[in-house]
Image (cartoon, rainbow, N blue to C red):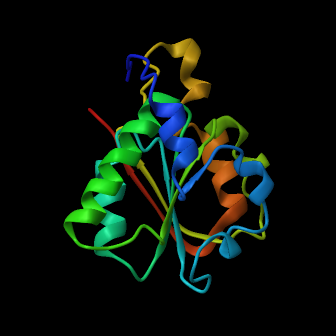
Amino acid sequence: MRIRRRPWAKKELEEASFYIDNPSVNIEKWKESFKISDKPIHLELGCGKGNFIANLASTHQENNYIAADMIEAMLGLSKRNIEEKYKEKNLTVDNLLLIRMNAERILEVFSEKDIIDRIYINFCNPWPRGKHKKRRLTHTRQLEKYKTFLNKNGRRNIFQNR
């Protein structure tokens, strides 16, 4: 999805307590990044404007969530939507982290020691041309990378536009 630059996004993200701009420093330490570290971790790749993860994380406080996108403006919108949803429910954002990351470099951010119980990929960028198929989040090469840190009994939820 194309989005216009949001000049306010960077400043707001830097001020947010639940945003991590350089997630590779947390490799092998994701459990400790949350207030309550014994909860299962769920990961959304390509979180977009954050409506899905905001609803999910605010409703299911029994899990910790990581929402990733590579576009700063998109993450800025996600941050605002997350804060709004948590405020509606009188909750503090302590079970959700927003990270800026390119999914092609996911193994620089998560390792086999970072056990992820569920991965969500909702309406990912389709990269419609054949020569771009290797860039898709659902390409076989990417799915193999996810196996590295996905719990053996974990699930992949993939929803695509058709």
Residue 122 visible in the current orientation: no
- Where residue 137 appears, as percent x and y from the top left, is 53, 38
> In front here: 36 or 63?
36
| Left or right: where 144 falls relative to 60 | right
- Vertically, is 108 above or below 112? above
Instruction: Please determine whether, in this image, residue 6 is positioned above or below residue 24.
Output: above
Image quarter of the N terminus: top left
Q: Is residue 110 left or right of residue 122?
A: right
Q: Residue at position x 46%, y 77% from top?
A: 63
Q: Is residue 44 above or below residue 142?
A: below
In this view of the protein, which residue sits in the foreground, 135 or 66? 66
Q: Residue at x 46, y 32 (%)?
A: 9
Quick check: 157 above or below 34? above
Residue 107 on image: x %, y %: 75, 49
State the residue lying farthest toward the left: 88
Q: Quadrant of residue 102?
A: top right
**Where does the image place residue 141, in percent across and percent down from the top left?**
67, 39
**Observer able to see residue 21:** yes
Residue at screen point 47% across, 71% down? 95
Q: Position of residue 54 (x, y in %)?
A: 33, 58
Left or right side of 134 for 64: left
Dividing the picture into quadrants, the one containing residue 84 is: bottom left
Q: Quadrant of residue 91?
A: bottom left
Given residues 26 and 113, the one toward you in this image is 26
